[in-house]
Image (cartoon, helix red, strand yellow):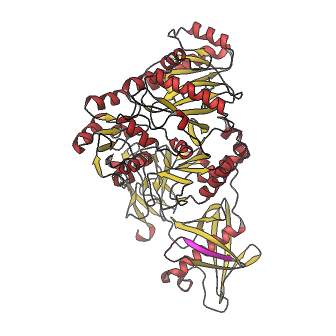
Amino acid sequence: MLPFTSLLIANRGEIACRIARTARRLGLRTVAVYSDADAHARHVSACDVAIGIGGRTPAESYLRADAIIGAARRSGAQAIHPGYGFLSENAAFAHLCQREGFIFVGPPAEAIRAMGSKSAAKTLMERAGVPLTPGYHGDSQDADLLRAEADRLGYPVLIKASAGGGGRGMRRVESAAEFAAALASCRREAGASFGDERVLVEKYLLRPRHIEIQVFADAHGHCLYLGERDCSVQRRHQKVLEEAPAPGMTAARRAAMGAAAVAAARAAGYVGAGTVEFIVAPGGEFYFMEMNTRLQVEHPVTEMITGLDLVEWQLRVAAGEPLPLTQEQVVLNGHALEARIYAEDPARDFLPSIGRLEYLATPPAADDVRIDTGIAQGDRISPYYDSMLAKLIVWGSDREQALQRMLAALDQYRIVGVANNVAFLQRLVAASAFARADLDTSLIEREHAALFPDPQPPPRDAWLAAAAAILCRMRGSPGNSPWAARDGWRLGARAQRELVLRAGGATEPVGVRYLESGWLLRIGEADVAAGCEPHADSATEFTLTLDGRRDRLTAVQAGGRVHIFMRGVRMVFEHVDPLAATPSIAAGGSGLRAPMPGRVIVLAATPGIEVAKGAALLVMEAMKIEHTITAPSAGVLRSFRVAAGEQVAEGTELVEFVPAQEN
Ligand code: MV4
């Protein structure tokens, strides 16, 4: 029995849901906190009680230590789990929890503080005998001294902000001549970002891997490691794929890295779950980078190969229990891979995407397929928080099997409504360098050609599938039957119409003839006998027949587009219907309204002047993404209801627009 019965989870999204799952299994009463933007979020319904803390941005909500403590008091929670991000590595918050009489499910505040400064952590690690990257991390910040240290190390070197972390505040320096300027610029950035100009200098390692060791310590002096994770596949210091064990890891090196990680944790006076990050040279030499004093996003790959529940361990250790296993009892089994699914657009430099999840299908969860997520179909992705939608984790008896399962699971992961990186992940997992486990932190750049192919027009059968799905939908609703259609359908012996589709920069007219037996679709010079049957109780699943070949087809119609998922391919088609009203970005409201909270950046039209359908009226920006609000038809913009530079809430009426026919 745990000595506490109620746990407040000071986080949101998938990790809050993940923590709630284990807490409830252990019989704890779970308390969620939520911001105004998260009132309908899954983590709220995943808990027994939920307390609103107001605000929308992290600073107004999940970063407010006082609000979290207040919610803990009100709810009667006895323990607080910070998850990752937000307040999880905030020593002052850990201290505050303790002072206010709550159990903080994390390390002691002093251990968090000890690892907060890179140079202090390096000094601590040096004393503990943990291997460090050759470099200088002393107190003196004299430019000549730093430059002499760089000369001694040999170029290239890396200047890192002492207070930095996760890749921020770093400068690579190629030669002595560049050193002074790079130092000055790194200092400025460090001062501006962390309020601390101090830096350290390291030998720059070429083609390194990022391998981290999961450690666990209890309050009784026991400390062990739970193997490693290879997180080398990153993009701009954001992890994309993680796996355990690290390809090529030998038992001897694992034992050496594990011992170093345990020494690091002991030196910091660690209790709880922690991760010691190492940078690993191509020859296998490993060096301490930093220690993360929290549960990590990628902890599930460790759980998959150890069969352990790390959140359960965290709660038991926080309750004062000893670790349930000894080092010898920790057994690693098989191989696990995690892919992070983000709402971001790889074709637009991975810009985050927001909107409503119109459609979401995932592979079924199983012993070897795990999905950690905090969202479901119909939810809105807001601009306020991290754009990670889900983590997809698979297990295989070896790496090859895990990779195959990942590809199969990604194929079944289907999202409509926000741009996402699933197709990118499919290419990444299939890339030969990844398949060969030729890993290092520049894999994504090295494989650029394979990962960012030029957009290709869809294959012929995808056009036919899109046309068939549209026809099937029309047949399903009487008002849209071909007999009622406006665009060229005629009664007569040769019943015929045309659908114009657009995709991948190409436009294709698909001719349709209605026969007794089904449709005859004409594309280019070919005639293809086609049929499409919707599955019972489903608006999106079909059986498609093309010239006698049957396929399972998922077709999602949303916002004037048809999203096709078939034979492992995902494609979006626009149905060009010259007589239909163009759905505008603000469709659904009476006026033209802001589709998301954001800032007005450009007023693009002149009030009182007639504009054509599709003309830009106004440009908004939300989370670095620009959205152009266009005229839904020809008409006149009477007035703007907002000013350039104005911050607007979702749904704010932006313009008064009068369509031409009403003029
Ligand atoms: C390095 C390095 C090469 N040499 N240090 C980036 C994040 C921060 N924690 C440390 N990082 C690096 N430190 C030396 N001496 C290369 C990186 C690095 C990196 C490390 C891990 C994962 C991805 C990376 C991507 C670029 C650079």
* In this view, 614 is above or below 61: below
Residue found 58% across the figure and 51% down from its top: 394
Residue found 52% across the figure and 41% down from its top: 298
Image check: 595 left or right of 262?
left
* In this view, 256 is above or below 453: above
Q: Nearer the viewer, residue 629 or 641?
A: 629
Image check: 374 left or right of 147?
left
The x and y percentages for residue 658 are: 40, 64
Q: Nearer the viewer, residue 259 or 123?
A: 259
Q: Nearer the viewer, residue 200 or 268?
A: 268
Residue 281 appears in the figure:
yes
Q: Nearer the viewer, residue 186 or 580?
A: 186
Report the quarter where the C terminus lies: bottom left
**Residue range (magenta):** 537-545
* In this view, 7 is above or below 525: above
Report the quarter where the N terminus lies: top left
Residue 566 lies in the magenta-colored region: no
Residue found 59% across the figure and 20% down from its top: 131
Residue 169 appears in the figure:
no
The x and y percentages for residue 73 are: 23, 40
Residue 539 lies in the magenta-colored region: yes
Tell me the quadrant of ligand 1.
Answer: top right
Image check: 120 left or right of 87?
right
* In this view, 383 is above or below 541: above
The x and y percentages for residue 453 are: 70, 50
